Amino acid sequence: MSALPNRRVEDWKYTDLRNAIEGEAVASAPVARWSVTLSGTVEQNELPEIMARGTHGEMGTVAAAHAKSGIFLHVGKGEQGTVHLELSNAGHGRALIVVEEGASLTLRETMSVGDFSNIAIEIVAGPNAQLHHIREANADGESVRVSDYSIRIAQGATYRAHFADFGAKLSRTELHIALEGEGAEVHLSGVSVLGDGGHADVTTRVTHSAGNAQSTQLFKLIAGGKSRGVYQGKVSVAEGANGSDSRQTAKGLLLGERAEIDLKPELEILADDVKCAHGAAIGDLDPESLFYLRSRGVAEPEARALLMRAFLEDAVAEITDEDIRAEVWSHVEAALAELTA
Amino acid sequence: MLEIEGLHVAVSGKEILKGLSLSIAAGEVHAIMGPNGSGKSTLSYVLAGREGYEIISGSIRYRGEDLAAMAPEERAAKGVFLAMQYPVEIPGVTTMNFLKTALNAQRRARGEKDIDALGVLRLVREKAKALHISEEMLKRALNVGFSGGEKKRLEILQMALFEPALAILDETDSGLDIDALKVVADGVNGLRSSERAMLVITHYQRLLNHIVPDRVHVLYGGRIIKEGGKELAHELEAKGYAEIIREAA
Amino acid sequence: MAALETREQVAALGEKYKYGFVTDIEMERAPKGLSEDTVRFISAKKGEPEWMLEWRLGAYRRWRQMREPTWARVHYDPIDYENAYYYAAPKSAADGPKSLDEIDPKLIETYNKLGIPLNEQMLLAGVAVDAVFDSVSVATTFKEKLSEAGVIFCPISEAIRDYPELVKKYLGSVVPVTDNFFATLNSAVFSDGSFVYVPKGVRCPMELSTYFRINAQGTGQFERTLIIADEGSYVSYLEGCTAPKRDENQLHAAVVELVALEGAEIKYSTVQNWYPGDEEGKGGIYNFVTKRGDCRGARSKISWTQVETGSAITWKYPSCLLRGDDSVGEFYSIAIANHFQQADTGTKMHHLGKNTRSRIISKGISAGQAQNTYRGLVSVHPRAANARNYTQCDSLLIGGKCGAHTVPYIESRNKSARIEHEATTSKIAEDQLFYCLQRGIPQEEAVALIVNGFCREVLQQLPMEFAVEAQKLVGISLEGSVG
């Protein structure tokens, strides 16, 4: 393969893969495996052969080339189900998930391995399908992990996803999302809570190919110690995609003396009848709020923890499945406790 | 002044006005009353020439001319004024600048000379006083951050400034408390004249206690279903729309 | 009031680009193409000292190894750098005019057409003008009054001769010779531009102004401006640009360097109205400009205000290096792109010192088939404790064939810094337009009125006489954008 993505490549400006891993290690990585738990009406099959579909980034293409096999999950028309994918063997992995017309799926992803993983996942949501996707990436200062999603959303379908990342030596989550039919919706949210040495990069590309579709993005980053949090969010509205509605918010809380947060919220608009807005902010905890709490008798460490939780709250609240939300929240709490310790 | 005959109007393919006929002479004040969704706002927009209001059939004659053939700004220059239910905010454009721009645009279209900045200021000041509109308000961006009452008063100020031949007041009472309503009604009454026709569109009878109409029309389902004198408004208030509609059916 | 004037203006002109005339003046040119000889020719023409020639040659050699940048969102056919003239001067001015009386009357006529009052009215207006016609400065007015205050305002070619120490110290100190392709090219072949030095504690007694005009065919313009505000001084500088209508594309690659020492303030305003090309996208200026200000001293301030309505292509990022503690950078921008214009413009705010503050207000308007990109960087260095930035970036679309793009980079490496960024994109609101029409304001005037309102925050930053001009330009540039 050619040189690994590095900071000279615009899309990888804040995440230098070449610095984090040898090209040889990438080339010789094995095929990844998942342990899969299914409920409801979900069929699981081997991906018979590499099918190059969807839009992937550089590393997604590399994963597709290396993973000779993968998994294929299918939810039939009008059916319902849940899937839990736990990454159990690191390496190049590939999955295809198809949710047919009117079907619904809750997809949960976790990982129990470190080392190098490079996963390409393709998701197809049929007309009026409902997909709820939650991915958690645990803190692991040694591992290098790249996930590349290609997601196509048909008319009337909704894709709702949350990405909780607790930092790795290098962690890159890349989403390529196309709203392909009228009334399609995508709602992305995420939290990155990074302790010393952690890195997490979430890069989203949402394209409004059809009109009257809606997209929202809400990402919150906390960077402590010597860590780096990155969010790059690009929203494109294609020519003629009138009635597009897009809102994006990205906020960073910089807590470490040697931490860095980089935000790049980008708009590319080629239709005029649109409503698009983004807001981005980076700062420390609000001193006035801190003072207010302390004046009411809350000790400083507790007050800080309270404000950090408040900062992340609305992003985690985007997870609609109560049980999963509670579990993610408990992991967020643990990460915060570590940060403030 | 205004002759509407058999007017059918559709908005995004859906027929809203279904054969409306109405005739207003100079010096008269007519009220159009109707429940929500009866087509009141559609009527006001089609008279002002808003895009997206398609005339399927029927005619609108204004002072003997075909009103529908005119561009919105042409109608304005020829004396058609619509006081809007929701006056629009235009950030960065001061109210005074807007008034001057509009007044002179209308004058120019009529082949009249521009009035200079000082002249316009004098004119506006004179009319603003009665409507309790402050200098400070005129310096702010048009309707931006104005209260509901301020917006409606500014609409009436414009009506006074432009001296239209036909004034259409669309739900001018909505969002006003009783004091504000009185200020607005006084402003409107002060503009009643034998040369001017007014069409007051409202849901409630309340406004008509202050602006007493010569004729009242009940609009329902895109048609006038009942007409009468000012007492019809009181009848409506007493019986409610449902009963009048039943009677008319 | 602006809108009214716009309408009158448009009616009176009967054409879209009022600056599109050509002045028929005998020109002296360097041979076509770019080589060390061209550089030597320019340097010799200017009677430059050896050190300046060496500086230029160094830049030229470096440029030969550089590649034209491609990251901006602009597309154009490759520029043939060998097929252009790099120096053109009005022949009669070759000996250098000593006063206004010595200037070719045709030039004066040109300036009158441009609406620059290059006469006693100027004194009343309190503006000193350095006019750069193609490549040379032809007149600097009110030298005496300025020199009384100790302010130096002269063509840069003159400064190289008369103030070599100042030039040596500051030229290339903000935009290094090797900075980027276009800046390096400029360093090799710049032919003139303005030089300003405001001494310690002096408040420049009048607005300084330069009017740039490209006149000759097949000529690039490479002016170089250097402004130094010494400790505790203040200067406001205005820059205007126009060019004739031509079918060919002409290159304009300027460099502007600002240096603000401790407690100094520089306000730099631009109304850029280079010929944008015709309605089919033919012709127009390629405007590749490097502008950078260095807040070198504590409590210094640099404020950029730009109204960009012209040029076929604009590639321009007036930036601030906030090095001094408590220094302030500002960027106020209106960029209008109509027909086939392409603009990629924005700013960079580098927060290096403590308590540095920056503010970015950008208003982009796209119409016709134009592409308009805001590209901006806010970067907070680890040392920049308590840095503050506020950015507001709004785009307006008129019609469904144009594009509006927003590419902000926000990078913070100091925990006490605060950065806020807001951006919106929408079309010109139909209800606002209808409201204006209902009150009798015709469509084009209504659009001009609404767009001027949208831009108000930026227009307010301009000195009065420029603000009026800019408001008119907004209306004129958007002509024919609504059907």
Image: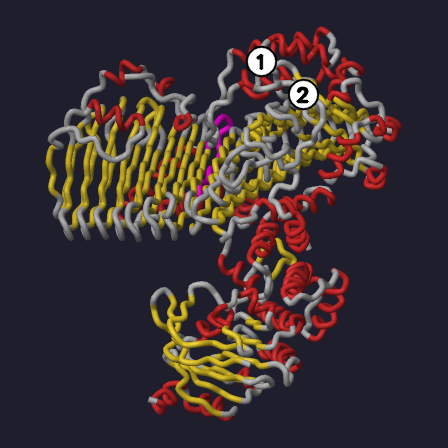
Mark 1 vs mark 2: tell me if same chain.
Answer: yes
Please state the horizontal and vertical placement of residue C34, each as a whole percent of the image: 58, 13
Q: Amino acid at mark 1?
A: Leu
Q: Amino acid at mark 2?
A: Ala
Please state the horizontal and vertical placement of residue B26, each as a whole percent of the image: 59, 84
Please state the horizontal and vertical placement of residue A155, each as a whole percent of the image: 26, 51
Which chain does the numbered disc 1 sit on?
C
Answer with left or right where residue C26 lies relative to residue C99.
Answer: left
* C177 vs B69, nearest the viewer: B69
Figure disc tally: 2
Residue under numbered circle 1? C34
Depicted B213 relative to depicted C430: above or below? below
Depicted C384 relative to depicted C16: above or below? above
Disc sitting over residue C133 in the figure: none
Range of residues picked out in magenta: A249-262
Query: Is disc 1 surrounded by few (<14), some (14 to 19) or many (20+) residues within 10 Å?
Result: some
Depicted A323 relative to depicted B69: above or below? above
User: Which quarter shows the N terminus of chain C?
Assistant: bottom right
Depicted B106 relative to depicted C334: above or below? below
Q: Secondary structure at mark 1?
A: loop
Query: Is disc 2 surrounded by few (<14), some (14 to 19) or many (20+) residues within 10 Å?
Result: many
Q: Secondary structure at mark 2?
A: strand
* C212 vs B112, nearest the viewer: B112
Which chain does the numbered disc 2 sit on?
C
Please state the horizontal and vertical placement of residue C55, each as a whole percent of the image: 65, 10
Q: Is residue A209 visible?
A: yes
Residue under numbered circle 2? C88
Closer mark to the observer between disc 1 and disc 2 = 2
Residue at left offset 51%, top offset 31% = C412
Q: Earlier in the sequence, mark 1 or mark 2?
A: 1
